[in-house]
Image (cartoon, rainbow, N blue to C red):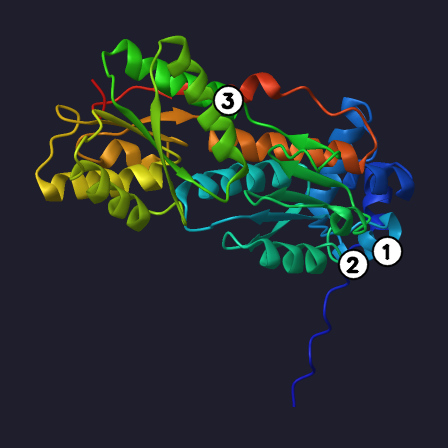
Amino acid sequence: MKDHQKNPRVPTIKDVAHAAGVSPGTVSRFINGRQRFSYEVEAKIAEAIKSLEYRANPMAQSMITGRSQLLGLCIPDISNPHYAAVIKGATQEASEHGYLLLLTDSEESAATERQLLEQLCMRVDGLIFGSRMHHDGFDWVRKLNKPILFLGKNQNWDGDCLALDNHMAGYMAANHLVHSGHRRIAYVGFKDSLADQERFLGIQELMQEHGQEVSVFRTEQPSPEAGGNVGSMLLLGSKPPDAVICFNDMLAIGFMTEASRLGFSVPRQCSVIGFDNISFCDYLSPRLTSVDFGGERIGRVAVRRILAMIDNREAPDDSLFLHPRIVLRESTK
C-alpha cells in the first residue's frame, strides 16, 4: 500500500519576510498597499512572493485590516451598453487597487435600489450608487454608515457625488442641430430620470437663445421599444419634427428603426441625436450621432473617488475627464 504524499507546506508572510530580509510587518503593509517602500525593498518582496508562490489569505487580511477589499456598484440597467462600459472601467480600476467589484442591477426601480444597497452595505468597504431615480429623501442611505458615492446630482443628496454636466450635454446637442438649419426639434426624454430635466433645460436654453421652441415627449422606459413607439407617433403626426434629440442612445436606436420601417429617411427627413455614445452607434445605418461622457472613464473616476473616501484622503480632481463631447456621425446633417 503506497504512502500518501504529504501536502507541501503553504508559505506564510514570515517566509516571504525571511526570503526578502525584511520584517513580516513590512511585507503585510506592502501587500495591503498601506505603505510604499524603496524600489530595492519592494523588488525584494515582489521577488520573494513570486519565488515562494505566496498567496494572501483574503479572510485573514480582512480580519487584520478590517476591510473586505470589496466595492459595491448599483447600476440602473445592466442591459444598457452604456452601463456595461461603466462597469468595465470600474472593474479595471478596482482591480488595479486590489479590490473586487460586487455588481447589482436595480432595473430602474427605486424600491429595488434600496433593497440592493441595504444588502450590499454589509459586504463592502464602499458603495457607488448609480441611480436615475427621483428620490424624495436619502435618510435611509445615510444610515447605511458606509462611504457612498452618488453618480449624478440630486437636491436631496448632500453627500459625495460624481456629477456629469448634463445641462451642457443637452445644450451641445441642440446647438449642433440649430446651427445645421433645423427648426422643428423634438426632445424624447425619460420621465423618471434625474438627468432628463438637466438635459432638457440645456436644450431649452439654446432654443430660447434662437427664439425657437422644443416639443417634449417623455417615455416610461429609456428603451428601443419606447423609442419606436414615440417614433411612429411623432413621424406620423400633423407636424413631424425635422430633428429629434433622444434621452439616450437606446431610445434613439428604437426611433431610427421605426423611422426606417415607416419609410422616413434619417437624416434627410429627420436628424437624430442620442446620449452615451454606446458602441452600437458605429454599427447602425446611418451611424448615430451621440453626446459622449466616456462610460469607462466614469467607472474609473468613480472607483478612484470611493477609494479616496474609504482612505479619508482628498479625492483626485478628475472632473476634466468627464466633460461631454459630441461625436458626429451620419444620423445628423
- Left or right for 111, reference 156: left
Nearest the viewer among 103 and 192 is 192
Quarter of the figure with the N terminus = bottom right
The residue lying at 19 percent from left, 31 percent from top is 240
Q: Name the residue that disc number 2 marks.
A: 59
Q: Nearer the viewer, mark 2 or mark 3?
A: 3
Q: Is residue 201 left or right of residue 55?
A: left
Q: How many marks?
A: 3
User: Mark 1 near mark 2, Cβ–Cβ under 8 Å?
Assistant: yes
- What's under tag 3, amino acid-wise? His
Disc assigned to residue 167? 3
Q: Amino acid at mark 1?
A: Met
Which of the 4 quarters of the picture holds residue 304?
Answer: top right
Residue at 82%, 26% in the rendered image: 37
Q: Earlier in the sequence, mark 1 or mark 3?
A: 1
Decide which of 300, 199 is in the foreground and name it.
199
Q: Residue at x 51, y 28 (%)?
A: 198
Quadrant of residue 174 within the rendered picture: top left
Marks 2 and 3 in Cβ contact (< 8 Å): no
